Image: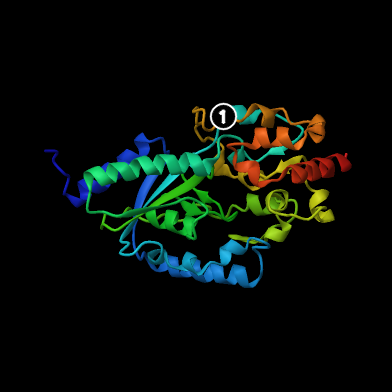
Amino acid sequence: MKEIIQNKDELSYELKKRAISEGFAVSAIASIPGSSRLKLRTIALERWLEKNYHGEMKWMEAEKRKNIESLLNGAKSVLTVGFNYLNEEQKEKTKFKVGKFGQGEDYHKVIYKKLKNIGKWINNEIPDCKWRICVDTSPLLEKAWAEEAGLGWVGKNSNLINKKYGSWLTLGFIILTKDFTPDNSSQSLCGKCEKCIEKCPTNAITEPFVINSDLCIAYHTIENRAQKLPDYIEKNLNGWVAGCDICQDVCPWNKRVPFNKSIEAAPRKWIRNLNIDSLSWDEEKWKKNLQGSTLKRIKPWMWKRNIKAILKQE
């Protein structure tokens, strides 16, 4: 009969180790309900919503986002993980720029599959522990819980920043009904640096840590369903056809991040080769290219709208 690990510290170590073996760059644990910082982050979220800085992203208003315990009855801990999506091939210069987060495989599916494997391990090693996976679309204060667990700190561009991997991380979580040993929370290391604020061409970072989506290039190229982009966005696209990495590219913490050489992070060929001819692609070709991509959220007509907006500025 298989011996089941019982020691709390050993279980916590093995759980995080398992996450790394699945291909995550970093992993850490936070206790629920967390420290006072979660209350402060929740208040900040409420302020952000009141100002309507979330634009058409109405899912951000979900009440469950303010209470992690509402997502799993008896929740006591949360495993937080970060997937490094930075790949060396993303360095290639292209006329039409695509946010690095969306160049490889759909990170929702990549992260979910890895977390599911961890869940199977939990079922085997800790059978009395129930769990729930949360990846991006779940109503969770993701960056706040990642910060609480010590995965990194929330930077002035509102992205989570890790000492080794910068902000080139997509996040995943497993909420757990067992009391694991928490890691130390992160403290901000941005200091006086405000390069992300200074370099944003549309002044979308209205103050440290606060993004006005209506001024954000990434928001408009991905979420805006209008037939035409606002003039103040169009004139500042500078090639960004899907997403925008400006506030990350200028961050000092992102300068020496190790590359993820896995196929999951490698940019797709069609993304590297986007050009003016892409305007002539029919729905079927767009559908084929976008299959298995995070960027399928951008409809074919939106891609064409964004490309035309860039060409108009030349």
Relative to residue 132, is residue 108 depicted above or below? above
Q: Could you tell me which residue is drawn at 56 percent across and 71 percent down?
A: 46
Q: Which residue is mark 1?
A: 266
Which x, y percent locates residue 290?
65, 37
Which x, y percent locates residue 301?
77, 44
**Picture quadrant of residue 285:** top right
**Picture quadrant of residue 45:** bottom right
Element on which disc 1 rests: loop
Q: Which residue reaches farthest front?
A: 284
Which x, y percent locates residue 153?
47, 53
Relative to residue 57, is residue 253 depicted above or below? above
Residue type, mark 1 in image? Ala
Q: Is residue 249 visible?
A: no
Query: Quadrant location of the N terminus?
Result: top left
Display colour scheme: rainbow
Direction from residue 267 to residue 171 in the image, left or right: left
